[in-house]
Amino acid sequence: MISTLLVANRGEIAHRVFRTCAELGIRTVAVHSDADENALHARVADAAVRLPGATPAQTYLRGDLIVKAALAAGADAVHPGYGFLSENPDFARAVLDAGLLWIGPPPAAIEAMASKTRAKELMGIAPLGEVTEDDLPVLVKAAAGGGGRGMRVVRSLADLPAALEGAAAEAASAFGDGEVFVEPYVERGRHVEVQILADTHGTVWTLGTRDCSLQRRHQKVIEEAPAPGLTPRLTEELYALAVRAARAVSYVGAGTVEFLVADGRAHFLEMNTRLQVEHPVTEAVFGLDLVAEQLRVAEGHPLPAAPPAARGHAVEARLYAEDPAHDWAPQTGTLHRLAVPAGVRLDTGYTDGDTIGVHYDPMLAKVVAHAPTRAEALRRLAGALERAEIHGPVTNRDLLTRSLRHPEFAEGRMDTGFYDRHLPELTRPLPDVHAPLAAALADAHGRSRFGGWRNVPAQPQTKRYEVFGEEIEVRYRHTRQGPVADGVRVVHADARTVVLEVDGVRRRFEVTRYGDQVYVGATRLTALPRFPDPAAQLAPGSLLAPMPGTVVRVADGLTEGAAVTAGQPLIWLEAMKMQHRITAPAAGTLTALHAEPGQQVEPGLLLAVVQPT
């Protein structure tokens, strides 16, 4: 029996495993980097061990340090979570060699499936060799790891060398393995997967299907179970292929077999030899705790002959600290508030007041809704996200709610190209037109010396805010009857709550302020100074860091005075395990270059200036 478990991971998944351990009476051990010293997973564990450093390569990818931590803390078992070393057979062997129980499949099974190239060979599928025009489009993929890192779609042979180089660099940074391969890219396919669970007694469960087609940068955004619209014949084929993959490597524990479904056919992608990020939707539909099942299987307990019956539908949305309207740029800063309405599940590695840093994945939380039907589950999740309090860095919350309500998704007609087609409309700013007025009224009340409104006529007051990148000016006046604004009746206003009446309809606004950041319901505003700072003006063609991160590369031979072409990659930034290119906005001359490899940058830092021709 397991008495003490170390989770070789961080954030949301570590916290989620600890929750199950607490229910089972198992003591827990966390490992944490210096950047995660005060992270939630390190605070809630019964014990925590420091891994010196901040980057994944220094900490969560150091299997030797993690095994030492387990032994020092008196753990008798190790759970790898997902990502980092979860699919590293050498780490699994090191855990077992240290006399610890490994919560996962045998190292040989991980080794067989850890490399996507070897997994495909095992299933009788060969990757592409030399790519020709007839093969296009193709997909460059990392052989190790997952989560969309180290993946590039290539539609021109001229773009292939850069895609191979970029994918290899990103894969090496995220997984410590830069091997990549090329396979055909199936347009408008659906990403469908099968959850499996196998014990040491020969039983293999297939726990339904999941659809994970809504993806950005090949990383999943919204997942659901079961996958909608599959025929019984195709579903049975998927189950059979999943069991075949599991039995081919004598699999034990929880795993996922992934497919691309197009034209009624299933194309094997890979087998993930670990728990998936989206496992909560399967748990909701089958009424299981997959982490508890993993632990029981590792202890040698047999599974029942058949899994529980499925019921209802579940949908999960991944809440990211990122800006979908600006190339999915990751965001950092203080998460002041994160709360969702009752009735949905929230899995997160953060609490109010935590800092979102630059070193790790920008996922803040997973929000999961379960209901008798798919339509009800979508409505419940969209409503919960819309009402959630998310105060801090910019997030993808609006994108999620609009995606869940989009006709193509609501009708189950989505595919992996959903965001390629619909991103502009899904990220179009739709600010609440009355939010700036509510913010201004609450601010004026909070700043009043008398704690209320002056009972004398006054000149019009103005307040400026930035909302979705647009500057908005608010005007109102104080009168003997209270504040007034054109076309709006102010029913009530104090520092936290404003009630406005428009055309006989009253609306209540809850206002929260953190410095110059103001939240009016779900609308995020930035209070602007009355007079712009002339020192903030920048030269035309200035290239600013869109996110915090590290400069990992500057284009070969790039120097001040060089001629550049529009769209030419100039600087590569790495943030939250993803690489981002800074390109020339127009053809011209590079008149300034302030970036150099290894440099740490903050958002808004001037990197270079291109003087347009």
Image (spheres, rainbow, N blue to C red):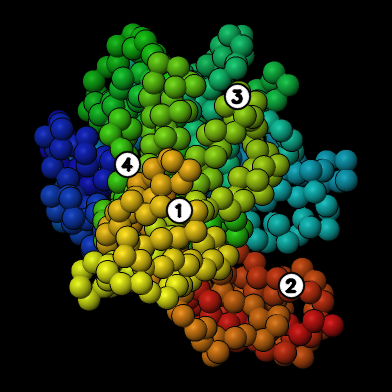
Q: What residue type is labelled 3?
A: Gly
Q: What residue type is labelled 2?
A: Pro
Q: Is mark 4 on a helix, strand or loop?
A: loop
How many numbered discs? Answer: 4
Tell me where residue 209 appears, x and y as whole percent.
Answer: 50, 21
Q: Which residue position holds label 3?
A: 412
Tell me where residue 321 appears, x and y as whole percent.
Answer: 45, 56
- For residue 488, which numbered disc appears in the image? 1
Q: How far apart are marks 3 and 4 (CA)?
A: 26 Å
Residue 206: quarter of image: top left
Give the mark nearest the N terminus, 3 or 1.
3
Q: Which residue position holds label 2?
A: 585
Q: How far apart are marks 4 and 2 (CA)?
A: 40 Å
Tell me where residue 76 appears, x and y as whole percent.
Answer: 18, 42
Of labels 2 and 1, the one closer to you: 1
Q: Is mark 2 on a helix, strand or loop?
A: loop
Q: Can residue 12 be seen in this view?
A: no
Q: What residue type is labelled 4?
A: Val
Of labels 3 and 1, the one closer to you: 1
Q: Do the residues labelled 3 and 4 touch (CB within 8 Å)?
A: no
Q: Which residue position holds label 4?
A: 340
Above or below, 146 relative to 257 = below
Q: Do the residues labelled 1 and 4 touch (CB within 8 Å)?
A: no
Q: Do the residues labelled 3 and 2 touch (CB within 8 Å)?
A: no
Residue 262: quarter of image: top right
Q: Distance between the residues labelled 2 and 1?
A: 42 Å
Q: Are marks 3 and 1 in contact (CB under 8 Å)?
A: no
Would residue 450 appear left or right of 262 to someone viewing this image? left
